[in-house]
Image (cartoon, rainbow, N blue to C red):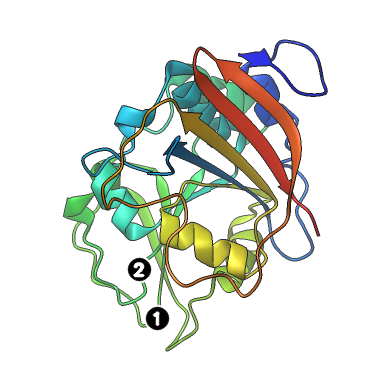
């Protein structure tokens, strides 16, 4: 991965992640880094999935974020659409042990009405994987081999600020990698809970009516970003922005 920004040196995906400060929470919540990918015209999927937009370095960066974070945050629809499974390879598990982290990050998701079903997401069948599901009233997920905990936050109580505070308080999470989808990321920004954005720009023009990197109601005010680094792999660009508060 070639660095085009102010650091002026080559950087591996692991070095990019190590510079994010995922061990440093922000007040009563974890530090939150979002990783998103979009085509040049802003589309977040091709034929309903993001995989066609990617590059090996982009996938490597995503997996290193997973390896370095205490928790992965993804919406229930994203878990189902992307068929989440096998989030880490053995080398990354060993890297986590070396860092003194638990073997697997917590997988956190929001299913406001409790409609998520374990059978719809392969990772729920992986023994020992810690999964935290946040709902309003609880959920009947069905059989799951993973270590699943359901947090019922009450009618109207599922805010991302409360979810993050719970991850920090109840699960010891200091750093979160948010993987979307677009509506979840919009809510995260609206609640002023995003610290860094890693946006991969894929050299494709997609058009159509598919999702964009953000979706849902307009933000109360645009979030101001500050460019920290710019990386390149082939024709893909990797933009590292910090939220400017």
Callout 1: helix, strand or loop? loop
Q: Height in image: 46 above or below 79?
A: above
Q: Is residue 140 visible?
A: yes
Q: Height in image: 103 above or below 197?
A: above
User: Label 2: which residue?
Assistant: 111
Please name whichever residue, 96 or 175, is drawn nearer the observer in this view of the structure.
Answer: 175
Q: Is residue 132 visible?
A: no
Distance between mark 2 and mark 1 Cα atoms: 8 Å
Which quadrant is the N terminus positioned in?
top right
Q: Residue at x 21, y 61 (%)?
A: 117
Callout 2: helix, strand or loop? loop
Q: Residue at x 64, y 67 (%)?
A: 165
The location of residue 129, given as percent across then percent down, is: 39, 43
- Mark 1 neighbour class, 10 Å CA radius: few under 14, some 14 to 19, many 20 or more: many
Classify residue 123 as left or right of residue 129: left
Classify residue 132 as left or right of residue 240: left
Please name whichever residue, 44 or 25, is drawn nearer the observer in this view of the structure.
Answer: 44
Quadrant of res 239:
top right
Which quadrant is the C terminus positioned in?
bottom right
User: Label 1: which residue?
Assistant: 136
The location of residue 86, given as percent across then percent down, is: 34, 32
Classify residue 68 as left or right of residue 24: left
């Amino acid at each position: 991965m070639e660095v085009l920004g102010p650091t002026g040196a080559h950087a591996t995906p692991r070095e990019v992640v190590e510079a994010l400060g995922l061990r440093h929470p922000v007040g009563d919540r974890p530090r939150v880094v979002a990783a998103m990918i979009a085509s040049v015209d802003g589309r977040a999927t091709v034929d309903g999935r993001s995989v066609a937009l990617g590059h090996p370095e982009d996938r490597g960066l995503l997996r290193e974020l997973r390896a370095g974070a205490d928790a992965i945050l993804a919406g229930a629809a994203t878990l189902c659409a992307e068929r989440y499974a096998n989030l880490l390879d053995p080398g990354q598990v060993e890297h986590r042990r070396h860092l003194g982290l638990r073997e697997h990050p917590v997988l956190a998701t929001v299913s406001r009405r409790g409609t998520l079903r374990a059978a719809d997401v392969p990772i729920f069948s992986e023994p020992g994987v810690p999964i935290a599901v946040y709902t309003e009233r609880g959920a009947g997920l069905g059989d799951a081999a993973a270590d699943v905990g359901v947090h019922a936050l009450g009618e109207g109580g599922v805010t991302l600020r409360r979810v993050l505070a719970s991850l920090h308080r109840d699960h010891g999470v200091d750093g979160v990698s948010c993987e979307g989808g677009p509506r979840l990321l919009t809510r995260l920004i609206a609640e002023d809970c995003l610290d860094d954005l890693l946006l991969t720009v894929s050299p494709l023009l997609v058009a159509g009516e598919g999702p964009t990197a953000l979706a849902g109601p307009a933000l109360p005010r645009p979030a101001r970003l500050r460019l920290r680094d710019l990386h390149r792999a082939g024709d893909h660009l990797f933009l590292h922005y910090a939220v400017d508060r």
